Amino acid sequence: MNQRSYQKELEANIDFHTSRGEVPALFLHSCCAPCSSYVLEYLSQYFQITVFYYNPNIYPEEEYVHRVKEQQQFIREFPTKHPVSFLEGTYDTGRFYQMAEGMEHLPEGGARCMACYELRLEETAKAARQLGADYFTTTLSISPMKNAQKLNEIGARLAQKYGIAWLYSDFKKKNGYLRSIQLSKEYGMYRQDYCGCVFSMRQSETRAE
């Protein structure tokens, strides 16, 4: 069975709108500025984007604040064809720890991470619908450590639940991850050495020992 190509689906979607002279509104969940860099470079050619920074998993609070500022700075500095705006979600860490209860010792990339993706994408879907966006999606698939199939399955399920279209994508394709590294260097961005939560930080520290 052929593996589904989310990149080809994205390109077909873009072609559909550009052939009609349309510039849809995209509500883009961003995990961090470096991951958003290539995604914004690519998608801002075809969409009017609102970057939604909703990441209650990030620990500690100082790290969260740092990442928010990096995201805002990149949006201010990066030239785009169509407008890119920024919206910060609520830093409700209690929701994340409630979600993670009982899964604290699971390895990165397991059930806890899947639940975290769903938590963040569900908030994105709700906000996107409230603001009248045409699509929502996330930068998360740009990471080689993230499972694009699972992310797209979560997004599609939430799209059906909330009645707003999910933009299928796999941003690591077409050297997206490598381009994000280049842009990070070009713009002097802070690239964190752990995903964001206290559990990923501990795992990163253990690997470094």
Image (cartoon, rainbow, N blue to C red):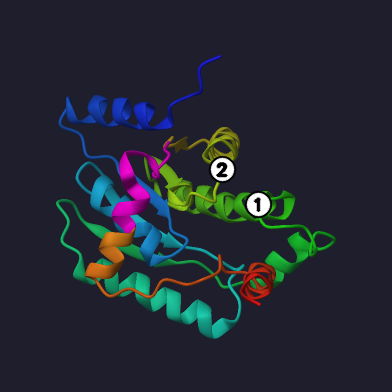
Which stretch appears magenta?
A: 169-180
Q: In the image, what residue occupies the spot 43% across and 39% down?
A: 170
Q: Position of residue 137 (x, y in %)?
A: 44, 45
Farthest residue in the bottom direction? Answer: 62
Verify whether residue 171 appears in magenta: yes
Q: In the image, what residue occupies the spot 40% across and 44% down?
A: 172
Q: Which residue position holds label 2?
A: 147
Please state which amino acid type lies under the numbered disc 1. Answer: Gly
Residues at circles 2 and 1 in contact by the CB criterion of under 8 Å:
yes
In the image, residue 201 sits, relative to residue 79, either above or below, namely below
Farthest residue in the top direction? Answer: 1
Count neighbours of disc 1 (C-alpha within 10 A) and say few if under 14, some if 14 to 19, many if 20 or more.
few
Could you say which is closer to the camera, residue 48 or residue 132?
A: 48
Please state which amino acid type lies under the numbered disc 2. Answer: Asn
Count neighbours of disc 2 (C-alpha within 10 A) and say few if under 14, some if 14 to 19, many if 20 or more.
some
Verify whether residue 48 appears in magenta: no
Could you say which is closer to the camera, residue 197 or residue 93?
A: 197
- Measure the C-alpha gap from mark 2 to mark 1: 8 Å
Q: Position of residue 156 (x, y in %)?
A: 54, 34
Report the predominant secondary structure element of the magenta stretch. Answer: helix
Left or right: 147 as drawn, with respect to 110: left
Q: Which residue position holds label 1?
A: 109
In the image, residue 192 sits, relative to residue 99, either above or below, namely below
Farthest residue in the front direction? Answer: 209
* Label 1: which secondary element: loop
